[in-house]
Amino acid sequence: MKIALVLDDSIDRPDGVQQYVLTLGAFLSRSGHEVHYLCSTSARSDVTVHSLARNVGVTFNGNGLRIPLPTSRRAIRELLDQERYDVIHVQTPHSPLFAARVVDEARKLQARSVRIVGTFHILPDSRLSELGTHALGRVLARNLRRFDAFMAVSEPAAEFAARTFGISATVVPCPVEVTRFAAEAAARDPEPGEDGRLVVAFLGRLVERKGVLELVHALDALPVELQERLEVRIGGRGPLMGDLEAAIEVSALSRVSLPGFVAEEDKAAYFADADIAVFPATGGESFGIVLVEAMASGAGVVLAGANPGYLSVIGDDPRVSVDARDSNAFAAALRLLIEDSAVREELHAEQAERVQRFDVERVGAQVLEVYGV
Protein backbone atom coordinates (compact mmCIF):
# COMPACT_ATOMS: atom_id res chain seq x y z
CA MET A 1 0.00 0.00 0.00
CA LYS A 2 0.93 3.64 -0.32
CA ILE A 3 0.40 5.27 3.07
CA ALA A 4 0.46 8.96 4.05
CA LEU A 5 1.19 9.73 7.71
CA VAL A 6 -0.12 13.24 8.34
CA LEU A 7 1.16 15.48 11.14
CA ASP A 8 0.44 19.19 11.56
CA ASP A 9 3.91 19.80 13.01
CA SER A 10 7.38 18.96 11.70
CA ILE A 11 8.59 15.37 12.06
CA ASP A 12 12.00 16.76 13.08
CA ARG A 13 10.93 17.59 16.65
CA PRO A 14 11.68 14.99 19.39
CA ASP A 15 8.14 14.88 20.82
CA GLY A 16 5.80 11.98 21.45
CA VAL A 17 3.61 12.30 18.37
CA GLN A 18 6.69 12.53 16.15
CA GLN A 19 8.09 9.41 17.81
CA TYR A 20 4.81 7.62 17.15
CA VAL A 21 4.77 8.63 13.48
CA LEU A 22 8.40 7.77 12.77
CA THR A 23 8.37 4.46 14.64
CA LEU A 24 5.16 3.38 12.93
CA GLY A 25 6.42 4.59 9.55
CA ALA A 26 9.64 2.60 9.87
CA PHE A 27 7.62 -0.54 10.70
CA LEU A 28 5.32 -0.01 7.72
CA SER A 29 8.31 0.46 5.42
CA ARG A 30 9.92 -2.74 6.71
CA SER A 31 6.62 -4.48 6.05
CA GLY A 32 6.80 -3.57 2.37
CA HIS A 33 4.55 -0.52 2.26
CA GLU A 34 5.44 2.83 0.70
CA VAL A 35 5.31 5.50 3.40
CA HIS A 36 5.12 9.25 2.91
CA TYR A 37 5.14 11.91 5.66
CA LEU A 38 2.89 14.92 5.11
CA CYS A 39 3.89 17.59 7.58
CA SER A 40 5.20 21.11 7.95
CA THR A 41 8.83 22.02 7.27
CA SER A 42 11.39 19.23 7.61
CA ALA A 43 15.10 18.90 6.89
CA ARG A 44 15.04 15.09 6.65
CA SER A 45 16.15 13.39 3.44
CA ASP A 46 16.21 9.76 4.59
CA VAL A 47 12.43 9.39 4.27
CA THR A 48 9.84 10.69 1.79
CA VAL A 49 8.61 13.98 3.24
CA HIS A 50 6.16 16.47 1.75
CA SER A 51 6.50 19.79 3.58
CA LEU A 52 3.22 21.56 2.98
CA ALA A 53 2.83 24.04 5.82
CA ARG A 54 4.53 26.71 7.89
CA ASN A 55 4.06 26.80 11.65
CA VAL A 56 3.77 29.25 14.54
CA GLY A 57 4.52 28.42 18.16
CA VAL A 58 1.80 28.20 20.81
CA THR A 59 1.44 26.86 24.34
CA PHE A 60 -1.31 24.29 24.91
CA ASN A 61 -1.90 21.48 27.41
CA GLY A 62 1.29 22.37 29.28
CA ASN A 63 3.43 22.00 26.17
CA GLY A 64 5.13 24.26 23.70
CA LEU A 65 3.54 23.32 20.37
CA ARG A 66 3.59 24.56 16.81
CA ILE A 67 0.44 24.85 14.75
CA PRO A 68 0.19 25.35 10.97
CA LEU A 69 -0.70 28.51 9.17
CA PRO A 70 -3.36 28.14 6.42
CA THR A 71 -2.11 25.64 3.84
CA SER A 72 -2.77 25.88 0.12
CA ARG A 73 -5.64 23.61 -0.89
CA ARG A 74 -4.29 23.64 -4.41
CA ALA A 75 -0.90 22.30 -3.28
CA ILE A 76 -2.66 19.59 -1.28
CA ARG A 77 -4.87 18.61 -4.24
CA GLU A 78 -1.90 18.43 -6.59
CA LEU A 79 0.01 16.17 -4.22
CA LEU A 80 -2.95 13.87 -3.57
CA ASP A 81 -3.74 13.64 -7.28
CA GLN A 82 -0.14 12.72 -8.00
CA GLU A 83 0.31 10.14 -5.21
CA ARG A 84 -3.15 8.53 -4.90
CA TYR A 85 -2.67 7.14 -1.40
CA ASP A 86 -4.39 3.96 -0.28
CA VAL A 87 -4.40 5.05 3.38
CA ILE A 88 -4.19 8.52 4.92
CA HIS A 89 -3.41 8.36 8.63
CA VAL A 90 -3.92 11.65 10.49
CA GLN A 91 -2.63 12.45 13.98
CA THR A 92 -5.45 14.07 15.93
CA PRO A 93 -6.51 16.46 17.35
CA HIS A 94 -5.63 18.13 14.07
CA SER A 95 -5.73 21.60 12.61
CA PRO A 96 -8.55 22.82 10.37
CA LEU A 97 -5.86 24.69 8.42
CA PHE A 98 -3.74 21.71 7.33
CA ALA A 99 -4.55 18.10 8.23
CA ALA A 100 -8.30 18.69 7.97
CA ARG A 101 -7.77 20.13 4.49
CA VAL A 102 -5.81 17.01 3.52
CA VAL A 103 -8.79 14.90 4.62
CA ASP A 104 -11.31 17.11 2.80
CA GLU A 105 -9.39 17.15 -0.47
CA ALA A 106 -8.63 13.42 -0.35
CA ARG A 107 -12.27 12.56 0.09
CA LYS A 108 -13.30 14.86 -2.78
CA LEU A 109 -10.65 13.45 -5.08
CA GLN A 110 -10.87 9.74 -4.31
CA ALA A 111 -14.33 9.45 -2.76
CA ARG A 112 -14.27 6.16 -0.82
CA SER A 113 -11.25 4.60 -2.57
CA VAL A 114 -8.87 5.98 0.07
CA ARG A 115 -9.14 4.82 3.68
CA ILE A 116 -8.78 7.70 6.13
CA VAL A 117 -7.94 6.89 9.74
CA GLY A 118 -6.93 8.97 12.73
CA THR A 119 -5.03 8.43 15.96
CA PHE A 120 -6.10 10.51 18.96
CA HIS A 121 -3.12 11.44 21.11
CA ILE A 122 -3.96 13.78 23.97
CA LEU A 123 -5.36 14.08 27.48
CA PRO A 124 -5.90 17.50 29.10
CA ASP A 125 -3.75 18.89 31.88
CA SER A 126 -6.40 21.45 32.84
CA ARG A 127 -10.05 22.34 32.45
CA LEU A 128 -9.03 25.02 29.95
CA SER A 129 -7.29 22.42 27.77
CA GLU A 130 -10.37 20.21 27.87
CA LEU A 131 -12.64 23.07 26.86
CA GLY A 132 -10.27 24.03 24.05
CA THR A 133 -10.26 20.49 22.68
CA HIS A 134 -14.05 20.31 22.92
CA ALA A 135 -14.31 23.55 20.95
CA LEU A 136 -11.94 22.20 18.31
CA GLY A 137 -14.08 19.07 18.06
CA ARG A 138 -17.09 21.23 17.22
CA VAL A 139 -15.12 23.07 14.54
CA LEU A 140 -13.98 19.74 13.05
CA ALA A 141 -17.34 17.96 13.33
CA ARG A 142 -17.97 17.78 9.58
CA ASN A 143 -14.37 16.83 8.85
CA LEU A 144 -14.45 14.02 11.42
CA ARG A 145 -17.33 12.38 9.57
CA ARG A 146 -15.01 11.87 6.59
CA PHE A 147 -12.80 9.45 8.54
CA ASP A 148 -13.30 5.70 8.23
CA ALA A 149 -11.85 4.72 11.61
CA PHE A 150 -10.17 6.13 14.69
CA MET A 151 -7.57 4.83 17.11
CA ALA A 152 -6.54 6.24 20.50
CA VAL A 153 -3.25 5.57 22.24
CA SER A 154 -4.87 4.56 25.55
CA GLU A 155 -8.25 3.91 27.10
CA PRO A 156 -8.24 7.31 28.87
CA ALA A 157 -7.44 8.99 25.53
CA ALA A 158 -10.30 7.07 23.87
CA GLU A 159 -12.70 8.24 26.58
CA PHE A 160 -11.53 11.83 26.14
CA ALA A 161 -11.92 11.56 22.36
CA ALA A 162 -15.50 10.37 22.79
CA ARG A 163 -16.24 13.19 25.21
CA THR A 164 -14.73 16.03 23.17
CA PHE A 165 -14.77 14.85 19.55
CA GLY A 166 -17.79 12.55 19.69
CA ILE A 167 -15.84 9.71 18.08
CA SER A 168 -15.46 6.03 18.92
CA ALA A 169 -11.81 4.98 18.86
CA THR A 170 -10.13 1.58 19.04
CA VAL A 171 -7.36 1.54 21.65
CA VAL A 172 -4.00 0.86 19.99
CA PRO A 173 -0.99 1.89 22.10
CA CYS A 174 2.03 3.82 20.90
CA PRO A 175 4.60 1.57 19.21
CA VAL A 176 8.12 1.39 20.62
CA GLU A 177 11.09 -0.52 19.24
CA VAL A 178 11.39 -2.64 22.38
CA THR A 179 13.88 -5.08 20.84
CA ARG A 180 16.14 -2.26 19.68
CA PHE A 181 16.21 -0.58 23.07
CA ALA A 182 17.04 -3.89 24.75
CA ALA A 183 19.86 -4.59 22.29
CA GLU A 184 21.34 -1.09 22.61
CA ALA A 185 21.20 -1.33 26.40
CA ALA A 186 22.96 -4.69 26.36
CA ALA A 187 25.75 -3.27 24.16
CA ARG A 188 26.45 -0.24 26.36
CA ASP A 189 29.44 0.49 28.55
CA PRO A 190 27.77 0.57 31.99
CA GLU A 191 28.01 3.69 34.15
CA PRO A 192 26.81 2.54 37.58
CA GLY A 193 26.55 4.82 40.55
CA GLU A 194 29.83 5.83 42.14
CA ASP A 195 30.79 3.86 45.25
CA GLY A 196 27.89 1.47 44.77
CA ARG A 197 25.24 4.18 45.00
CA LEU A 198 21.82 3.47 43.51
CA VAL A 199 21.12 5.56 40.40
CA VAL A 200 17.84 7.47 40.36
CA ALA A 201 17.28 8.81 36.84
CA PHE A 202 14.77 11.23 35.28
CA LEU A 203 14.49 12.17 31.61
CA GLY A 204 11.99 14.61 30.16
CA ARG A 205 11.21 18.19 29.28
CA LEU A 206 11.84 20.53 32.19
CA VAL A 207 8.30 21.86 32.32
CA GLU A 208 5.88 21.94 35.24
CA ARG A 209 3.70 18.97 34.36
CA LYS A 210 6.65 16.57 34.04
CA GLY A 211 7.17 16.81 37.80
CA VAL A 212 10.94 17.32 37.97
CA LEU A 213 10.70 19.78 40.88
CA GLU A 214 8.39 17.38 42.71
CA LEU A 215 11.08 14.72 42.29
CA VAL A 216 13.71 16.93 43.92
CA HIS A 217 11.37 17.78 46.79
CA ALA A 218 10.57 14.09 47.38
CA LEU A 219 14.24 13.12 47.33
CA ASP A 220 15.01 15.95 49.74
CA ALA A 221 12.33 14.58 52.09
CA LEU A 222 14.21 11.27 52.44
CA PRO A 223 16.35 10.62 55.51
CA VAL A 224 19.94 11.74 55.04
CA GLU A 225 21.21 8.17 55.31
CA LEU A 226 19.10 7.21 52.29
CA GLN A 227 20.12 10.28 50.31
CA GLU A 228 23.74 9.27 50.78
CA ARG A 229 22.99 5.96 49.04
CA LEU A 230 21.83 7.72 45.88
CA GLU A 231 23.26 9.23 42.73
CA VAL A 232 20.62 11.35 41.00
CA ARG A 233 20.74 12.01 37.25
CA ILE A 234 18.24 14.48 35.79
CA GLY A 235 18.28 14.59 31.99
CA GLY A 236 16.42 17.05 29.82
CA ARG A 237 16.16 20.74 29.15
CA GLY A 238 13.45 23.35 29.31
CA PRO A 239 12.25 26.54 31.00
CA LEU A 240 12.47 25.13 34.53
CA MET A 241 16.25 24.63 34.40
CA GLY A 242 16.91 27.66 36.62
CA ASP A 243 14.25 26.61 39.13
CA LEU A 244 15.64 23.06 39.11
CA GLU A 245 19.18 24.23 39.80
CA ALA A 246 17.91 26.43 42.64
CA ALA A 247 15.90 23.57 44.18
CA ILE A 248 18.94 21.29 44.08
CA GLU A 249 21.12 24.01 45.61
CA VAL A 250 18.90 24.40 48.69
CA SER A 251 18.29 20.65 49.10
CA ALA A 252 20.38 18.23 51.11
CA LEU A 253 21.16 16.13 48.02
CA SER A 254 24.88 15.68 47.50
CA ARG A 255 25.16 13.71 44.25
CA VAL A 256 23.06 15.25 41.47
CA SER A 257 24.10 15.59 37.83
CA LEU A 258 22.29 17.44 35.02
CA PRO A 259 23.42 15.88 31.73
CA GLY A 260 21.01 18.01 29.70
CA PHE A 261 19.57 16.72 26.43
CA VAL A 262 19.97 12.95 25.97
CA ALA A 263 20.12 12.02 22.29
CA GLU A 264 17.93 9.24 20.92
CA GLU A 265 20.92 6.95 20.40
CA ASP A 266 21.97 7.41 24.05
CA LYS A 267 18.60 6.83 25.69
CA ALA A 268 18.90 3.07 26.13
CA ALA A 269 22.25 3.33 27.94
CA TYR A 270 20.95 6.18 30.10
CA PHE A 271 17.90 4.18 31.20
CA ALA A 272 19.75 0.88 31.59
CA ASP A 273 22.10 2.41 34.16
CA ALA A 274 19.16 3.47 36.34
CA ASP A 275 18.27 1.39 39.38
CA ILE A 276 15.11 3.51 39.70
CA ALA A 277 13.83 5.46 36.66
CA VAL A 278 11.34 8.10 37.78
CA PHE A 279 8.81 9.92 35.59
CA PRO A 280 6.55 11.88 37.97
CA ALA A 281 4.33 13.70 35.47
CA THR A 282 1.33 15.24 37.19
CA GLY A 283 -1.07 15.16 34.22
CA GLY A 284 -1.61 15.87 30.56
CA GLU A 285 -0.22 12.48 29.48
CA SER A 286 -2.22 10.31 27.08
CA PHE A 287 0.37 7.52 27.09
CA GLY A 288 3.94 7.16 28.31
CA ILE A 289 6.47 6.38 25.59
CA VAL A 290 9.36 7.23 27.90
CA LEU A 291 8.15 4.64 30.42
CA VAL A 292 8.13 1.96 27.74
CA GLU A 293 11.62 2.98 26.60
CA ALA A 294 12.96 2.76 30.14
CA MET A 295 11.39 -0.66 30.74
CA ALA A 296 12.63 -1.90 27.37
CA SER A 297 16.14 -0.75 28.22
CA GLY A 298 16.13 -2.81 31.39
CA ALA A 299 15.93 -0.07 34.01
CA GLY A 300 15.82 -1.63 37.47
CA VAL A 301 12.30 -0.41 38.13
CA VAL A 302 10.17 2.37 36.64
CA LEU A 303 8.22 4.63 39.01
CA ALA A 304 5.65 6.92 37.40
CA GLY A 305 3.22 9.66 38.21
CA ALA A 306 -0.29 8.31 38.78
CA ASN A 307 -1.87 10.12 35.84
CA PRO A 308 -4.27 8.16 33.58
CA GLY A 309 -1.97 7.97 30.56
CA TYR A 310 0.99 6.66 32.54
CA LEU A 311 -1.21 4.19 34.42
CA SER A 312 -2.29 2.75 31.06
CA VAL A 313 1.36 1.78 30.58
CA ILE A 314 2.64 1.00 34.07
CA GLY A 315 -0.49 -0.60 35.50
CA ASP A 316 -2.26 0.19 38.76
CA ASP A 317 0.31 -1.30 41.18
CA PRO A 318 0.69 1.44 43.86
CA ARG A 319 4.34 0.48 44.32
CA VAL A 320 5.18 1.91 40.88
CA SER A 321 2.74 4.84 40.67
CA VAL A 322 2.51 7.86 42.91
CA ASP A 323 0.82 11.24 43.24
CA ALA A 324 3.87 13.38 42.59
CA ARG A 325 2.29 16.42 44.24
CA ASP A 326 2.24 14.59 47.59
CA SER A 327 5.88 14.87 48.66
CA ASN A 328 5.47 12.55 51.63
CA ALA A 329 3.79 9.80 49.60
CA PHE A 330 6.34 10.28 46.81
CA ALA A 331 9.21 10.00 49.30
CA ALA A 332 7.63 6.88 50.82
CA ALA A 333 7.41 5.23 47.39
CA LEU A 334 11.05 6.06 46.71
CA ARG A 335 12.07 4.78 50.14
CA LEU A 336 10.44 1.40 49.54
CA LEU A 337 12.28 0.94 46.26
CA ILE A 338 15.59 2.15 47.67
CA GLU A 339 15.50 -0.05 50.74
CA ASP A 340 14.03 -3.28 49.34
CA SER A 341 16.06 -4.86 46.53
CA ALA A 342 13.70 -7.85 46.45
CA VAL A 343 10.78 -5.55 45.59
CA ARG A 344 12.86 -3.93 42.86
CA GLU A 345 13.68 -7.34 41.39
CA GLU A 346 10.04 -8.46 41.52
CA LEU A 347 8.83 -5.30 39.84
CA HIS A 348 11.61 -5.43 37.27
CA ALA A 349 10.51 -8.92 36.20
CA GLU A 350 6.88 -7.81 35.94
CA GLN A 351 7.78 -4.75 33.88
CA ALA A 352 10.08 -6.73 31.59
CA GLU A 353 7.10 -8.90 30.69
CA ARG A 354 4.61 -6.03 30.52
CA VAL A 355 6.69 -3.98 28.08
CA GLN A 356 6.35 -6.58 25.32
CA ARG A 357 2.76 -5.54 24.64
CA PHE A 358 4.05 -2.20 23.32
CA ASP A 359 6.59 -3.62 20.88
CA VAL A 360 6.27 -2.11 17.42
CA GLU A 361 5.79 -5.49 15.74
CA ARG A 362 2.76 -6.24 17.89
CA VAL A 363 1.32 -2.73 17.77
CA GLY A 364 2.03 -2.35 14.06
CA ALA A 365 -0.05 -5.44 13.33
CA GLN A 366 -2.95 -3.84 15.20
CA VAL A 367 -2.61 -0.65 13.17
CA LEU A 368 -2.66 -2.65 9.93
CA GLU A 369 -5.92 -4.24 11.06
CA VAL A 370 -7.43 -0.76 11.40
CA TYR A 371 -6.08 0.05 7.95
CA GLY A 372 -8.08 -2.93 6.71
CA VAL A 373 -5.13 -5.17 5.84
Image: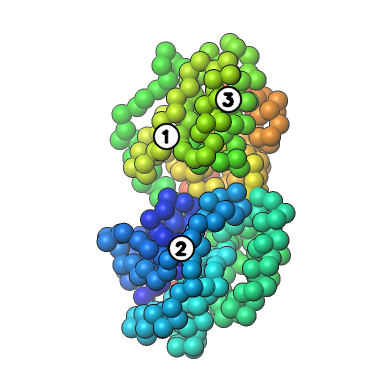
Q: Nearer the viewer, mark 1 or mark 2?
A: 2
Residue drawn at the location 70% of the way across and 55% of the way down: 128
Quadrant in the picture for the C terminus: bottom left
* Label 2: how many Cα within 10 Å (few below 14, some 14–19, many 20+): some
How much space separates mark 1 and mark 3, taking CA atoms? 16 Å
Task: Looking at the picture, tell me which residue is in the foreground, 227 or 258.
Answer: 258
Q: Secondary structure at mark 3?
A: helix
Residue 359: give x, y in percent of width and height: 45, 52
Q: Earlier in the sequence, mark 3 or mark 2?
A: 2
Q: Residues within 10 Å of mark 1 (few under 14, many from 20)?
A: some
Which residue is depicted at the point 63% across and 58% down?
A: 157
Residue at 36 percent of width and 80 percent of height: 79
Q: Is residue 350 above or below residue 89?
A: above
Q: Nearer the viewer, residue 357 or 71?
A: 71
Measure the alpha-carbon separation of dots 3 and 2: 35 Å
What residue did someone put label 3 on? 247
Residue 110, image x and y in percent? 45, 87
Amino acid beneath label 1? Gly
Q: Residue at x 52, y 73 (%)?
A: 97
- Using residue 93 as the reference point, say whether residue 20 is left or right of it: left
Residue lying at the far left of the rendered structure: 45
